[in-house]
């Protein structure tokens, strides 16, 4: 009882998040190397060496930060990633928490991430971090709205707000084919909520690292880990919602799920390296004028398909 | 002292270096950007080594000390062709670019393994100004806003919004002279509402930039056009590297830099780079038609900025040697950030084509009373600092738009020394002293 309902779920989430975050760093290194960045310690060793360096580095202070919020924000973001991953099913039975409202919980993770990212930038009490925080809040709503419509789209054929039911509803046809607009839109949401690549407006280079510009040492390690972990959690949600989750021939369900998560991660990381950062104003326009209406179309498409 | 496995592992990490770009220190940073095992970071908080590359004027030592003290322990400093601060007299100074990357790696290794102590703090760990003790909450403002507690202006809703009707608190800050996103040496006072720039006031101009000696020789007598054009292409490609890196396109930025370092780049490879930039969305996603220069301002700036605004101003048209090669100035019409990048890429391609053509016929310049430099026409006087035009150009733009506009504009003054002369350490220091005087 305790093993199945407490130890196994905690173990599952911890292992997937830690190993997943490490793989995010490795895949990103490999892609960067393949695209021409001079490589240093090697893709497998580089993330470990950087982590060790951050553990050796002093956690600095800024002038009058909100200490509690500043130190708590990375841990909270990591906790949100863990909560998001907890509702992702790896097989019909291997699910950390099989909530009947798991899709709604995922939506709340996206919303709360906005609060935590703002907290991280604001509490440092420095200019560039604050601008990063402002930016995320200004843009967060547009990602969340798109996500909401797209996720309602996958809940319709399943007639459920439970990720495991959403996966089961794709037995005959995966949602990536059934609702062709859904996955591309959801990937945009993923880049936005994890502020990665073209949508990295919160921790961007023009802000010298944005919300993380004034962070060093172990808190920066936790923040980097949390960002990678959120990508892992997102890839789990995307694989469940659109790529049939554990469904697939020959291999065991959890293996299929992990492979699909890795595929989503690879796509996101590749986009992150190939595209420039979108200007905030262009981003707002694209979100509200192009992608949000497309998410309506996706929802109508899903509704019509469900009625058919 | 025993070295733990964690320290040994940390010593294997890429060396995170925060570069303070002094006068004529840029060139070595381009080399470091292509060096495996060295990572140039944008925040001093993310660095293990502070690299001061090039001379720093003594009146900016205070700013340098503040940057120095922002690095988290353990950290070290390395001075490349620059005189260490008096308090750090025993710090390592290197003048040979070939040994720099090795020295950085060795330094990082020693720091991690505890063989080298952390650089000492130079400033007292206390607020730079006292608490004012004025106003409702003791900060000198009204309610919970305004005032300058500890000498830091607090956000205060004193300015009307100038763009979208959303009035946020205004915050005034001083940025530079070592902020990596600004040209080296540029120091500005900026008032922001959120990330919208309300006012931008240039305090210190950027450091002068040195050109390759061929531009100086062109003012003395005929020089091979191939050499001149290759130097022009190199300059523009290095400029492009900075902007692409800022835009988050690291791979393409490094491609541009590699092209700059190749002695005989093929124009086709530049065309490929341009196509990759178009496909990546660089022109569509990172520019919004901002940073447009009117005709008068474009003429004042000269060079790429003028031609991107449709002005056919190019000294090369006056030269018989160029006319023999069929040279015609290329232009754009819009005069905005995107147009300047399109113009830059087109001019790099044109320069390499001209170089290939001129090499075949061994064509030389004919006129020596002027030369077209990457910064504009050098005739009678060299292109001077134009950074004050930012004071009118940038207000009303968001931070990202302002920085991409700034990256697309080349406003720095030209140095009276050539790149080859300026790379000598004594000269770099002399320039710093001259600036101070």
Image: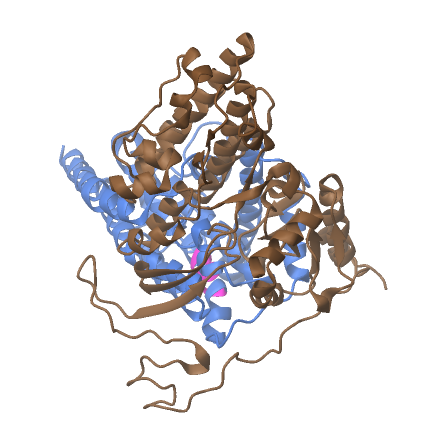
Chain colours: A blue, B brown
Residue B340 lies in the magenta-colored region: no
Q: What percent of the width, then of the height, locates residue A190?
A: 37, 46
Q: Foreground: A15 or B234?
A: B234
Eyeballing the image, is A144 above or below B376? Answer: below
Residue under the image location 46 percent in, 66 percent down: A73
Query: What main secondary structure does the magenta stretch of the protein show?
Result: helix
Q: Foreground: A114 or A163?
A: A114
User: How many marks overall?
Assistant: 0
Quadrant (top left/top right/bottom left/bottom right) for the C terminus of chain B: bottom right
Residue under the image location 27 percent in, 48 percent down: A281
Q: Left or right: B72 with respect to A223?
A: right
Q: What percent of the width, then of the height, locates residue B205?
A: 46, 55
Part of the protein shown in magenta: A75-82
Answer whether residue B163 is visible to the viewer in this image: yes
Q: What percent of the width, then of the height, locates residue A22?
A: 58, 46
Q: For the view shown, which residue lies furthest in the right direction?
A: B1
Answer whether residue A191 is visible to the viewer in this image: no
Q: Foreground: B188 or B338?
A: B188
Q: What percent of the width, then of the height, locates residue B37?
A: 67, 42
Q: For the view shown, which residue lies furthest in the top direction?
A: B361
Residue under the image location 36 percent in, 58 percent down: A109
């Amino acid at each position: 009882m305790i093993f199945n309902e407490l130890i196994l779920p905690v173990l599952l989430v911890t292992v997937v998040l830690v190993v997943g975050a490490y793989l995010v760093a490795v895949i990103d290194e490999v892609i960067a190397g393949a695209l021409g960045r001079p490589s240093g310690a090697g893709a497998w060793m580089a993330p470990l060496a950087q982590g060790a360096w951050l553990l050796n580095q002093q956690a600095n202070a800024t002038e009058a930060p909100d200490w509690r919020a500043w130190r708590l924000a990375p841990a909270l973001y990591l906790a949100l990633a863990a909560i998001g991953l907890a509702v992702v099913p790896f097989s019909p039975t291997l699910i950390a928490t099989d909530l009947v409202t798991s899709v709604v919980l995922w939506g709340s993770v996206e919303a709360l991430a906005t609060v935590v990212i703002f907290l991280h930038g604001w509490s440092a009490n420095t200019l560039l971090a604050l601008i990063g925080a402002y930016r995320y809040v200004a843009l967060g709503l547009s990602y969340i709205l798109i996500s909401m419509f797209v996720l309602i789209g996958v809940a319709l054929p399943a007639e459920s707000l439970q990720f495991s039911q959403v996966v089961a509803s794709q037995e005959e046809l995966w949602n990536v084919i059934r609702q062709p607009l859904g996955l591309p839109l959801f990937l945009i949401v993923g880049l936005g909520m994890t502020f990665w690549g073209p949508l990295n407006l919160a921790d961007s280079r023009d802000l010298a690292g944005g919300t993380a510009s004034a962070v060093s040492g172990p808190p920066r390690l936790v923040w980097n880990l949390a960002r990678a972990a959120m990508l892992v959690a997102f890839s789990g949600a995307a694989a469940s919602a659109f790529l049939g989750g554990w469904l697939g021939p020959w291999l065991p369900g959890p293996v299929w799920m992990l492979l699909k998560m890795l595929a989503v991660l690879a796509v996101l990381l590749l986009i992150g390296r190939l595209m420039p950062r979108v200007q905030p104003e262009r981003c707002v326009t694209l979100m509200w004028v192009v992608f949000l209406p497309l998410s309506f179309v996706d929802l109508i498409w899903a509704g019509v398909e469900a009625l058919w | 002292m025993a070295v733990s496995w964690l320290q040994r592992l940390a010593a294997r990490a890429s060396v995170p270096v925060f570069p303070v770009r002094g006068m004529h220190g840029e060139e070595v940073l381009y080399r470091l950007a292509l060096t495996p095992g060295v990572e140039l970071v944008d925040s001093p908080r993310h660095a293990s080594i502070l690299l001061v590359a090039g001379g720093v004027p003594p009146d900016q030592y205070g700013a340098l000390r503040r940057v120095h003290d922002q690095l988290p322990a353990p950290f070290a400093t390395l001075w490349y062709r620059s005189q260490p601060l008096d308090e750090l007299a025993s710090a390592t100074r290197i003048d040979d670019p070939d040994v720099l990357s090795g020295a950085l790696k060795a330094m990082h290794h020693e720091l991690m393994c505890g063989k080298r102590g952390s650089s000492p703090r130079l400033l007292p760990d206390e607020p730079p100004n006292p608490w004012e003790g004025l106003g409702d909450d003791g900060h000198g403002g009204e309610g919970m806003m305004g005032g300058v507690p500890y000498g830091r202006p607090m956000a205060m809703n004193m300015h009307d919004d100038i763009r979208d009707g959303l009035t946020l608190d205004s915050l005034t800050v001083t940025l530079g002279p070592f902020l990596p996103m600004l040209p080296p040496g540029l120091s500005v006072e900026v008032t922001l509402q959120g990330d919208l720039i309300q006012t931008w006031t240039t305090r210190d101009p950027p450091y002068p930039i040195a050109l390759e000696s061929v531009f100086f020789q062109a003012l003395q007598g005929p020089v091979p056009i191939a050499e001149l054009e290759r130097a022009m292409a190199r300059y523009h490609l290095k400029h492009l590297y900075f902007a692409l890196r800022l835009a988050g396109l690291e791979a393409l930025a490094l491609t541009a830099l590699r092209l700059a370092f190749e002695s005989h780049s093929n124009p086709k490879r530049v065309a490929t780079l341009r196509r990759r930039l178009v496909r990546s969305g660089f022109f569509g996603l990172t520019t919004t038609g901002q940073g447009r220069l009117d005709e008068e301002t474009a003429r004042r700036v000269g060079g790429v900025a003028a031609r991107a605004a449709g002005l056919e101003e190019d000294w090369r048209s006056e030269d018989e040697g160029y006319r023999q090669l069929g040279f015609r100035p290329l232009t754009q019409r819009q005069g905005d950030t995107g147009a300047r990048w399109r113009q830059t890429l087109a001019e790099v391609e044109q320069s390499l084509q001209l170089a290939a053509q001129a090499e075949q016929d061994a064509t030389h310049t004919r006129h020596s009373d002027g030369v077209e430099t990457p910064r504009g026409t050098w005739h009678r006087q060299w292109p001077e600092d134009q950074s004050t035009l930012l004071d009118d150009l940038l207000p009303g733009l968001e931070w990202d738009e302002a920085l991409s506009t700034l990256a697309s504009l080349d406003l720095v003054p030209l140095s009276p020394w050539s790149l080859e002369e300026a790379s000598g350490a004594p000269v770099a220091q002399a320039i710093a002293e001259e600036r101070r005087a």
